[in-house]
Image (tube, rainbow, N blue to C red):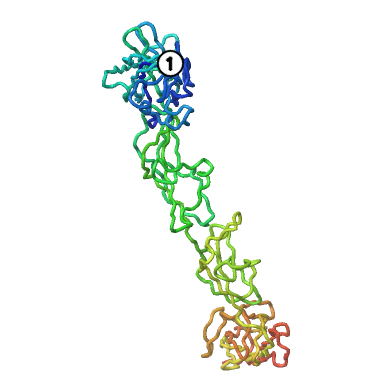
Amino acid sequence: MKAILPLLLSITLLGSLGVHAQQFSPTTGMPCANCHPAGYSMVHTPSISDVWSPSGSQVDKWNIQGPRLPDPPSDYSKGLPFGGGQYSFVTLKTSEGVYDDRVFSNVSGFTIGQTYQLHYSVLSASVHYEAGNNSPYGGSGTMEIFTTGPNAVEIASQTTDIDAFSRNKWITRVITFVPTSSVLQFKMTGTTPGLSAGYINFSIDKYPIDCMLQNVQVEIGQNTFTALFPTNTLNLSTVSIIGATPSAAELVWKTGPNSTDPTLTAEEASAIPVGNLDPANLKSYYAFYYAKDFNCYNVSVSDAELKFMYTPTQVPLKPQTNVFLSCPAVTADLTAFEENPVTQVRWFNNNTHSGLPVFDPKAVPPGDYYAFYYEWQTGAYSLKPGQVSNAHVHVESAVPAGIPDLGPLLTINSLIFSQNGSKDFVVKIQNGNAENSNCSVYLKVSKLPGFNITYSTQAGQSNGINTNNDFWTFSENGSYITVTSKTGIAGNGYSYIGFTITRNGDTPDDAKQNLSVTIPIAGGGGETNIGNNQTITGFITTSN
């Protein structure tokens, strides 16, 4: 049986990193006679061969020293399974006027006016037939590039002539072309001197065109992002990129700086985790431009590094965080101490968010409380287990309540008032028992006709006595000044309240007025002895 490959000229469009034209169909397939690779058309009777035999023949062999031809420089063919097209290529029979096999393929997506470079390789071979004779070696192989349609024009052509020293070897060539149309036809032909058939093969890889992306790094607007919670994720599509993405390229993210590192899927890039959960294995992400049609990146090593790091964050609190409950309050509002929180806050009675959070942070009893940022969607806290919160509020009752024995005592340095005379007087509230009062301590100071009584709401001094009016609140009606403590009065404790009383100008001489200070039953702070809850002091007016 005659073999059909006296000359093998293989032109391999090397899988380089691509531009924005479409992918080529590789010139590979299961070895067969009178056939062509997928994506190609044929004229006459080309075939598909591999390095072991021409056209899949079981009897004809390559005319070489050794068992096989050199591997075609096609990454795609190398990756095919053994016996399933591995190391395959397209074969043409050629001669002078008798054999003229051709294959061609139309490829779309080119940019008019853009300069492209197409890599390919050429191999000339001879076939040893079953009958014992050998075919001639092919003389040359030609790559031609045309526009398509009825008025097709050739825009580039390159012929590789094979001499005796170049046979059975792959010859790498590069053809440069400038499209005048977005769709081009790539045609492969060959010649062999004489009338006997020579055979040449063309092998086109999947990514044959040089990358047209500029060797420029992606520029990220912000390189470091901070996560409030260790469970936070970041959508990389929201990251600002400076400058436009090159035409026919896309922005992709990888887990390492090399273009060969794994690429994040769209789903992975939409929710990347923080990169420092494991301090011994810090993770960053790197941006590349990628031209999909030609498997090409802008750079082989990216400097466009993005870090997404979790930072333990404390809840900011207002400066005053030691709280003494003011009467009649028995609880405190912890939320009042939060200083512009950025998200939801939870409070605990421990500094490591152990156990259950505070049920109602707006009404907590005395105790120590600690704030944490909380993400309800994931149940995560801004501080991981074991990390300590320093956002601390201490709530304290002024005194714990018991059964007091309260009584008022008034001191004044004179009971006689001349016209427009003014004197200070001090009311001492004494707790005669060793037990504390509750928060409901209050007293009533009577108002006198012809006199005006005033007071300060600040601590001060009256008649040489240090007063603590700031411990009390004051209110008035037509008959009384009501004075209420802000906290209880401790057992055996006391408090001084300072007043000023002034005789009015129209008050007659020789008048007598009685000033009463009374602790009502309800104002006794929980006491049961009310026999000492009032003091009455008389004043006299004179003309001098």
In percent of width and height, residue 303 lies at 36, 45
Q: Quadrant of the C terminus?
A: bottom right
In percent of width and height, residue 217 lies at 36, 40
- Please, what secondary structure does the residue beneath circle 1 have? strand
Is any atom of residue 192 visible in this view?
A: yes
In this rendered view, identify the residue nearer to me: 223 or 96.
Answer: 96
Circle 1 Cα neighbour tier, 10 Å, few/some/many (<14 / 14–19 / ≥20): many
Image quarter of residue 67? top left
For mark 1, what is the residue?
103
Q: Would you place residue 329 above or below residue 32 in this image?
A: below
In this rendered view, identify the residue nearer to me: 397 or 143.
Answer: 143
Which residue shows up at 49% across the image and 28% down it? 84
Total marks placed: 1
Q: Is residue 114 left or right of residue 418?
A: left
In this rendered view, identify the residue nearer to me: 503 or 300.
Answer: 300
Image quarter of residue 100? top left
Q: Quadrant of the N terminus?
A: top left
Which residue shows up at 38% across the image and 26% down it? 68
In percent of width and height, residue 246 lies at 41, 33
Is any atom of residue 513 visible in this view?
A: no
In this rendered view, identify the residue nearer to me: 323 or 151.
Answer: 151
Q: Would you place residue 173 above or below residue 367 in this image?
A: above
Residue lying at the far front in this picture: please name it: 132
Residue lying at the far top in this picture: please name it: 97
Q: Would you place residue 213 above or below residue 301 in this image?
A: above
In percent of width and height, residue 125 lies at 34, 19
Residue type, label 1: Val
